[in-house]
Amino acid sequence: MDYSLEYKSKLRTADEAAKIVKSGDWIDYGTNLGFPKLMDAAIARRKDELKDVKIRGNLIFEPIKTVESDPEREHFIYNSWHCSGYERKLSDKGLCNFIPMIFRNLVPYYRHFLTVNVGMACATPMDKHGYFNLSCASGIAKGILDKADIVIIEVNEKMPRVSGGYGNVIHISDVDYIVEGDHGELPKLPVSDPTAEDLAIADQLIKMIPDGATIQFGIGGMPNTLGKMIAQSDLKDLGMHTELCSDAYVDLWEAGKLTNKMKTFLKDVGVTGMAFGSQRVYDWIDENPCVTFMPLEFVNAPEIIAKNDKMISINNCIAVDLFGQVSAESSGTRHISGTGGQLDYLTGAAMSKGGKAFVCMTSTYVGKDGVRRSRIQPTFAGDIVTDPRSQAYYLVTEFGIVNLVGKTTWERAEELISIAHPDFRDELIEQAEKLSIWRKSNKR
């Protein structure tokens, strides 16, 4: 069937399509490479005509014109499900509000509770069957667009076309408007050089990973560091089941370590819901039948994660308190990122036969005031709890790995202080004694 006439009938300039947005609307920008930058700029140009337009998005790395054109937030109110570094800066300025969620629940939230007056997303050019590929945003894009009253697809010819189990495409019959235009280069996630602490943490983790393991990496420098180290190790026949596909998996694939042959669920393919990183990632996933994209409500479901034996989950955090509570999304009350899928994978990996769930951190950090502080704290002071103490498993710093499962409060305090930076251990012991979670027989 020829869809060219339908395509032409729905084709609009960004400014024409932006006229559909009304004051008071809820509009949705989706996630990462799916961010519709041309539509965002066109809506920003209508600023003086609009009031109280609420926008949802997440993990957006480029300037959001609707936000930056309206610092008083009189016209546009931006909200993020999971903050990128850029969105964190907006949050610091009071220009972005956070929406708490666990990633596997995001699309069901839309399906059952939320309103989307206008949903928009970037996608690849339409294929001969009338489908637009939702590319790196496939994990959530289709579910959000399904709820929208009006659907706008912004065509970006530079986006990779990804293989999918389901949910990775949208048909032209479900699209109201199509926008074309130049998008420039795809946004890249900077890859920083590893620190000595990163290398020490990775060196410990690699000893805990068996051959044939299926691996989930979270966001950050640690996963990329570990990916490079595994690529140079003797490990073999690793699998991929992850919320986010990043450079770490490309390193494993190119080194022949990532085969997916030993997976006990969805064998022979790497499974993911989103992707971002360097151009290497986008080139690797483009029309690659060995990488399949599926909705995050499936990919991140703990019972699905647990179907893979020897599931290894590796994520970062900001701080841990002596009771074993983990914060991966705030520093005090300052918002940093989000829950994302960390709790999903911590739970799923712990349920897996032979699985292990690791949460990693450097033992200290230096604040903006130049003062070095311990990431292991006596108690939290407003920090948002990402992983409850009842779900804490392996905690890792450059000084060691401890497993908190089944440990009493005083055992937890002892274990956590043992991997704190030596400069802070005496102070932490003193605080643990005041909290009545330190025994006189504990090690010093």
Image (cartoon, grey):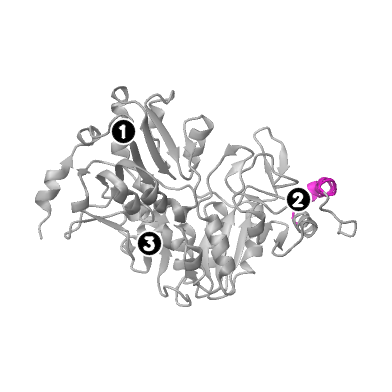
Amino acid type, label 2: His
Q: Is residue 83 above or below residue 141?
A: above
Q: Quadrant of residue 379?
A: top right
* 290 on left or right of 306: left
> Could you tell me which quadrant the C terminus lies in?
bottom right
Q: Residue furthest right?
A: 440
Residue 398 vertical placement versus 268 (above, below): above
Quadrant of res 311: bottom right
| Dot placed on the residue nearer the N-terminal end, 2 or 3 | 3
- Is residue 432 a member of the stretch shown in magenta? yes
**Nearer to us: label 1 or label 3:** 3
Where does the magenta region start and end? 419-435
Tell me where residue 257 appears, x and y as whole percent. Answer: 49, 71
Where's residue 262, x and y in %?
A: 48, 77
Judge depth for marks 2 and 3 and give the one in front. Answer: 3
* Helix, strand or loop at mark 2: loop
In 3D space, how far apart are the residues under numbered discs 1 and 3 (Cα atoms)?
Answer: 30 Å
Q: Which residue is mark 2?
A: 421
Q: Which mark is residue 294?
A: 3
Q: Amino acid at mark 3?
A: Met
- Between disc 1 and disc 2, the foreground one is 1
